[in-house]
Amino acid sequence: MPAPPVSVRYDATHGETDGMHRATVPARARSGEQRKMDRLAGRVALVTGGGHGIGRATAIRLAREGAAVAIADLEADAAGQVADEISASGGRALALACDVTDTAAVDAAVAATVARFGQLDILANVAGADINEPPFAEQTDDIWHLMHDVNLMSVVRCSRAAIPHLLVSPHGGSVVSVSSVNGLLAIGSYPYSASKAALQNLTMNLAAEYGPRGVRFNVVAPGTVRTRVWEDRPDDLAQMRMLYPLGRVGEPEDIAAAIAFLASDDAAWITGVTLPVDGGLTGSRPVVVVEP
Ligand SMILES: NC(=O)c1ccc[n+]([C@@H]2O[C@H](COP(=O)([O-])OP(=O)(O)OC[C@H]3O[C@@H](n4cnc5c(N)ncnc54)[C@H](O)[C@@H]3O)[C@@H](O)[C@H]2O)c1
């Protein structure tokens, strides 16, 4: 999500603001990632982009809830570190080098997951990327193709390879993909945002197609999340918290908690939805204040 071009505050009807940022969110309002649950015992999950950020937190969360987890990432070392971390905590994990823009690599990752763990019940499509693109009129076809390849076609490839296994899951298969509030609002980064919006429509269609056969498809749409993509823009990240009624940007664990919920039987009657996990951003009415 791009930095706001102007300073932003919330209307008084949305609560008080101190001008810079909102009240500290109490600890109890943070995601309960420390709790041990067995909601996903006996399940096997494949997490793309599991080497860093939201994907890493998702792999760890799914493992903590009892799933065996395959971590597929462009960066094999990062995937390996996450797998080691899960194994050291007593979980079952498999690291896979996989570029989600490569159909053969995706097919091989799904096959390796099933070969190792015997089944596949959960697919978490987390891998994705944005780029700093020029203004719209200067954007080349290559930029658009790149964004659609890594954010949309990646999910097509992974879902296509996983569906035969999800259809025979004894638990009912579940696919959770990560889009962005950029897919819900007009906030710039057009090629990225359009690819995420398309992902949400793909999910509705797959949910309708495969729901009768027991496979659910849902999307989580995060707001700003503190991952390495913001590392070189700490000032932008700090400013971002002003956009969020809950007074902070998201942590990877906030998104992982929502993914785990949608993957679990707690969401057994939920399919085809895009769930914003965004500290209230998309449900609120910001007031834009243009500095003199
Ligand atoms: N961080 C945010 O503010 C934010 C907000 C909304 C949505 N998202 C979405 O969340 C997802 C994860 O983002 P993040 O912030 O955790 O980023 P990140 O860079 O921390 O992690 C992304 C992971 O995906 C992997 N990856 C990238 N391209 C890949 C490819 N072609 N094949 C396999 N793996 C690949 C990377 O190696 C990395 O491990 C993305 O889909 C992103 O669009 C992030």
Image: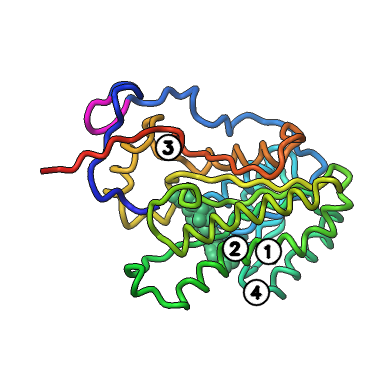
- Which residue is depicted at the point 61% across and 71% down? 101
Alpha carbon separation for disc pair 4 and 1: 11 Å
Relative to 113, say whether 186 is above or below.
above
**The image quarter in which residue 23 lies:** top left
Quadrant where the C terminus lies?
top left
| Kind of element beneath mark 1 | helix
Give 98 or 291, whichever is nearer the viewer.
291
Q: Are marks 2 and 1 in contact (CB under 8 Å)?
A: yes
| Kind of element beneath mark 4 | loop
For the question of whether residue 131 can be seen, the reply is yes
Q: Which residues are magenta?
A: 17-22
User: Measured from the top left, where is residue 133 in percent x and y?
Assistant: 37, 68
Q: Disc number at residue 102?
A: 4
| Kind of element beneath mark 2 | helix
| Kind of element beneath mark 3 | loop
Alpha carbon separation for disc pair 2 and 4: 13 Å
Residue type at the position of mark 1: Val
- Residue with the mark numbered 3: 281
